[in-house]
Amino acid sequence: MKRRNFLAGSSVLTIAALALPIYPSRAGEPFTDGQTAALLRLVKDIFPHDALSDDPYQAVVGQLTGAAADPNMLTLLRDGLASLDAVAEGAWHERTEVDRVSALKEIQSTPFFLTVRVMTLFGLYGNPAIWPAFGYEGASYEQGGYLFRGFDDLDWLPEPLS
Amino acid sequence: MTQFDQNDDSVVVVIGSGAGGATVAHELCEKGIKVVVLEAGPRFTIDDFHNNELAAYQQLTWADKRYATGDWPAATLAPEGPNWIVKAVGGSTLHWNGLSFRAQPHEFKARTTYGEVEGASLADWPVTYDELDPYYSRAEDKMGVTGTHGIKRHPANNNYKVLYNGAQRIGYTQISNARQAINSEFRDGRGACIQLGFCNQGCKMGAKWSTLYSEIPKAEETGNLELRSGCMVLRIEHDKAGNANGVIYVDGDGVEQRQSARVVCVAGNAIETPRLLLNSNSSLFPDGMANSSGEVGRNYVRHVGAIVFGEFDKPVNMHRGITVPGTVFDEARFDPSRGFAGGYLIEAVSLGLTNLAVVGDAAGWGRNYTGFLEKYDHLAGVLLNGEDMPRSQNGVSLHDTERDQYGLPVPIIHVEEHDNDHAMSAHFKGQAEALLGAAGSTKQHHVVTAAATHNMGTCRMSADEDKGVVNSFGQTHEVKNLFVSDGSQFTTATAENPTLTIVALAIRQADHIAAQMSAKAL
């Protein structure tokens, strides 16, 4: 209860939210195919990266679906998707990107949007599978750090004088 | 392992095992004094640390509930987690960056130097730079600070190259990558840095000084230390004369315990330290222990902070190597012509992708934000670390009704920022943009830092017992055998990262306690 209240009540992210657990992934239930498609569209529109495949976004949808085992979360997500359809006057996820983003801006302060944003933030950027696309190399200890792997390979500026 | 009886009233009890607590404990143990350290968090080993931002955050962070109020960014961006500090043996020496600068002589005389600043509670420290100088030297030797005691500095990493060249091109002359308590080669039983890039997540090389694997095991080797982890202190008790005589704590099994004490040193970081004193109220100390001045919990300072990231056409790979690899000191001077009192440091800084996505824009989403994140390996960062103005109304108080898992009132951290802080921050942003631009950055991205990591001033030192909580040795004015051993003692923030000064003060405090014990004054 406390965690959901925090998510719903936060106007914006706190770094303390880093302590959120990653929910176990679940497939399908309890959403309709249309709702699942809309959730995928939603997490991609919140943090769109054209270079990424759908896989890491699908993983986030799986986490959202897992979190929806909590009936309050399920209601939040279902009602939120319905509110998007209402703003879009039809199936939100079938609209153009411009129209979808415009609808999202109208609901960006709602607990629904903030909750999905926070969970996508951690689910996506905390997923090591996407890091190579950004040039972030992650854990280095097992490879001996960067001392012999480019910690000082920037060659387009002069070397500092010490 | 040494164990002391809980009724042994000859021991010094130290609360907290971070930079201040573990240092004062170790120094006392070396002098043959028996010490019990009570640490609220668990004891990890170096092997337990994660090269992963999320996992390390979850492992190390002090996540007990706190509230932020006032007009500082934390009140809106991190209303229930305004302070990023560590709950584990070693305290925040596990996640600190290792920057070890001495505060400047004039900063110990902030009130005299800056004059009257309206709306600020500036004061001079009751200790001078010259008095602290030999203790700074001992601290630098203890911690292995590069550029001191013949310890060589680290090679320049990519992020430092950007800072250095940008700074030089806009006319700065005081640029350095020295003064790091990170081993550049094997020293004092600690390994050498291999540029892991995870300084804030617990150094897996043990190259960065931390009390977890320096002061604490050394103190244990003397046979004079017992460290009890997982023990949260609830209150300090006193005898009829008003001298501290023991502490009540909850052990790892949730059982309430009492440890008798000859002397008590509090070093729980500048939130928990005043909170404990306020919670230790009694008929003799109705407003909290050692609080007849009413200054316990007040004058909280945390440094003015901000980050600017520059985008470059060519790769930087800022994540490779030391997280905060170098510093510009030109703006650390006292120069009111800039429109503010106090000075600031400009420090190169990197974040991993996860933390960058989290803090880069606390409400960010959409293509504008993801476009910035996609520049990840072409980004370099610079950080502001500046002296903020102390204010009487800024600080730590106790929630009227809400209790935490220990049954203690939840702390509320209130900050009303001073205009001087805003003027400094604006000046930094201009300089940071110029610096990054001079190094070749085509676009800059401003980040508001919410969670405070440098917490200071909430039990400030003062010569006059009405104007502060402790004297120049960290000894409370009101209870002679009660000491404050962490950054809570700071009278003002200074522009420098606080740890070296905390350690220097702790060494000096241990000398004082030992002398007073020998003289039977304690």
Image: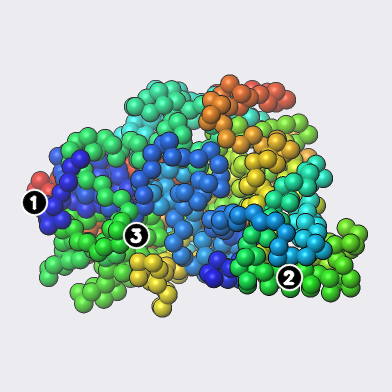
| Label 2 in the same subunit as label 1 | no
Q: Please, what secondary structure does the residue beneath circle 2 have?
A: helix
**Residue at 77% over, 56% down:** A40
Q: Which of A88 and B387 is in front in this view?
A: A88
Quadrant of the drawing holding the N terminus of chain B:
top left
* Image spot of residue A34 (x, y percent): 82, 63
* Image spot of residue A81 (x, y percent): 77, 68
Answer with the quarter of the image where residue B468 lies. bottom left
* Image spot of residue B42 (x, y percent): 36, 49
Q: How far apart are marks 3 and 2 (CA)?
A: 46 Å
Q: Which chain is home to disc 3?
A: B
**Residue at 41% over, 43% down:** B93
Q: Distance between the residues labelled 2 and 1?
A: 71 Å
Are discs 3 and 2 less than 8 Å apart at CB? no
* Image spot of residue B420 (x, y percent): 56, 59
Q: Name the residue under label 2.
A: A78
Judge left or right: residue B44 versus residue B251: right
| Label 3 in the same subunit as label 2 | no
**Residue at 52% over, 65% down:** B80
Q: Kindly report which numbered mark, 3 or 1, lies closer to the viewer in this rendering.
A: 3
Choose the circle earlier in sequence order: 3 or 1.
3
Q: Kindly report which numbered mark, 2 or 1, lies closer to the viewer in this rendering.
A: 2
**Can you tell which mark lies on residue B520?**
1
Q: Which chain is home to disc 2?
A: A
* Label 1 CA crowd tier, 10 Å (few <14, some 14–19, many 20+): few
**Can you tell which mark lies on residue B273?**
3
Answer with the quarter of the image where residue B129 lies. top left
